Image (cartoon, rainbow, N blue to C red):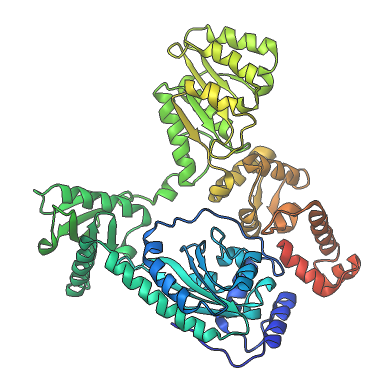
Amino acid sequence: MGFQPSSPRTPTTIATARERFLSDDDVPVGVRESISTSWRRSRAFNVHADRLELPFVREPNLESPLVSAARPVIRQLADDLSAEPVSIILTSPDGVVLSRATAHRPLERMLDDVSLAPGYSYSEEHAGTNGIGTALENRQATLVRGSEHYAGVLADLSCAGVPIVHPVSGACVGALDLTGLADDGGPLLLSLAKSATAQIEQRMLSQASEHESRLLNAYLATCRRAPQMMVLAIAGEVVLMNQRLRLAIDPQDHISLLEHAVDQTLDTTASRRVGTMASGRVARLSPVPEFWDDTAGMAIFHVHLIDTGERAEPATARRRGTALPGVVGRSSSWHQACDRVVRSLRAGDWLAVSGEPGTGRSTVLRTGAALTRGNVRVFSAADLRIPQSLDALDTELDREDFSIVLRDVDALDGDTLDHIADMLQGREGAGWVGVTVGDLTVDALHDADAAAILLPFFTHTVPIPPLRHRIEDLQDLIPSLLRQLTRGRELTVSSAAMRQLAKYSWPGNVAELRQILREIVTHQRSGVIDVNQLPPSCRALSRHTLTRIEAMERDAIIRSLEENGGHKPAAAAALGISRATIYRKIKEFGIDL
């Protein structure tokens, strides 16, 4: 679906419509539906309407197949447009700018000012309505002119973005965007972007390997011959399955099905294979003989699902608990971490558990050790700063079959770590030791000595994911923590409050969640916790880290809204600010009452 021109409207009219939307949520008649819908998404993402704070995501991969296919097309287009104030921008599928080409220095400076540069993300989530992010979101060619941009700092630009679709897999692999000045010909930019994108996609097709092209042709032929059948095709790293098959199996079964298919390509004696998938369903794979090429690893299968009447529950429903008693959570990353801890402990391996403070790394290690080792002696970093505790540790290590947990060793100084290392030396076969340490994936350790001095003693290091990376675990954590804090009383969280808590970034992880619930429980020990019982930090969700002044301003607005029954004009009057300002601040701070 291509660009849909709106009725003629002056830039001033669009700017006025945008201001009206930002102030009172109303979209005037005449704003294109694709733009108004994108404005609403941008507001839901809490994108700032007056400034851009874009993250630098990563250094672009300039050797990717997309960049290789696009490079000559962009070079030719840049030569053709060298006298025009136009920039040619290539992005990844998540909106990260890979390359930018322009010969117009003033425009280049404008783009630098708004971070429309390699490595920065122009997805709608970060930049709001724009030619790149909105094209990727809608997966269609999109022109965004002047004040149609959600962020006011982009109002001097026009952006024409077109998604780039891989001709073999059908996946969106990026976008091509032409950005110029707002007053210049937008529809022409879109036409040029479409033409260049078609050339890039054609080059990607020509670059596809021979067996990938053969696979695509064989797959399409099989689907045409038997449209009622479920079809799976594999060749190397390329996997194709028709919609009928995708809709018929659960996501967790995809991997199981592919494993059975790969096994069958390796077993040339099997004419068909029956396998059980992760959900418990049974699939029979029947190869299509004319497209079988075991030397190239290419195969096309008809897939038949067999109803055994014993289908297992989905993994998410089947495994609410973990391998550790009393440790709750439903996310796959949490289960994998707990399982790895238990496997290492049962093997008798010395184990390090890493993660941000408050993630539950100590709980997981202590619970696992108690389950597999029995009585465990725990020494905290505070304990180990005291000479008497170091003596107690030395005594414990002299025992037969000792079991010891050392907590937060990254908080210890180098001398203490050296002392502990001397104690551990030579004791590896006599008992078991586990340690907890800070997040090793970032520069977060208090001192690198912990990693350098102690970690070589430990066979495995299991990272515990932060709560923001397993936000679905709130569904289990909150009821469990409330039962602990209320000693079993009936206190629950409303669906609206749960959704609000799920939007929070949880920098303090589970420890912060426990503290917030503890504060709520001091005032309410039964009933239902709703959004208005949550602390201001959880009700106000901003896309950027607030300064102290902004945080004070946010809290003052929330208090005024509460004191005035949520009536925004009255709250604005009480604060001495205009109605338009309080609406703007509510959106800026993501306040939800």
Q: Is residue 570 left or right of residue 225?
A: right
Quarter that holds the C terminus: bottom right
Q: Is residue 123 left or right of residue 305?
A: right
Residue 71 vs residue 231, the one in the foreground: 71
Residue shown at the point (16%, 47%) measured from the top left: 266
Name above or below for residue 190 compared with residue 164: below
* Residue at the image position 57 percent from the left and 78 percent from the top: 85
Q: Position of residue 100 (x, y in %)?
A: 52, 66
Q: Residue 66 lies in what quarter of the image?
A: bottom left
Which quarter of the picture shows residue 362? top right
Residue 566 lies in quadrant: bottom right
236 and 250: which is toward the camera: 236
Q: Measured along the vertical axis of the image, is residue 580 above or below residue 256?
A: below
Q: Residue furthest left?
A: 269
Can you give x and y, in whole percent of width and height, for residue 137 in the image? 50, 70
Provide residue 572's location: percent of width, then percent of height.
Answer: 86, 69
Q: Residue at x 63, y 67 (%)?
A: 44
Q: Position of residue 22 (x, y in %)?
A: 71, 75
Nearest the viewer among 189 and 293 is 189
Taking the image as shown, residue 295 lies to the left or right of residue 511, namely left
Which quarter of the image is occupied by the N terminus?
A: bottom left
Q: Residue lying at the far bottom in this picture: please name it.
A: 8
Q: Is residue 46 visible?
A: no
- In the displayed structure, 136 sits above or below 529; it is below
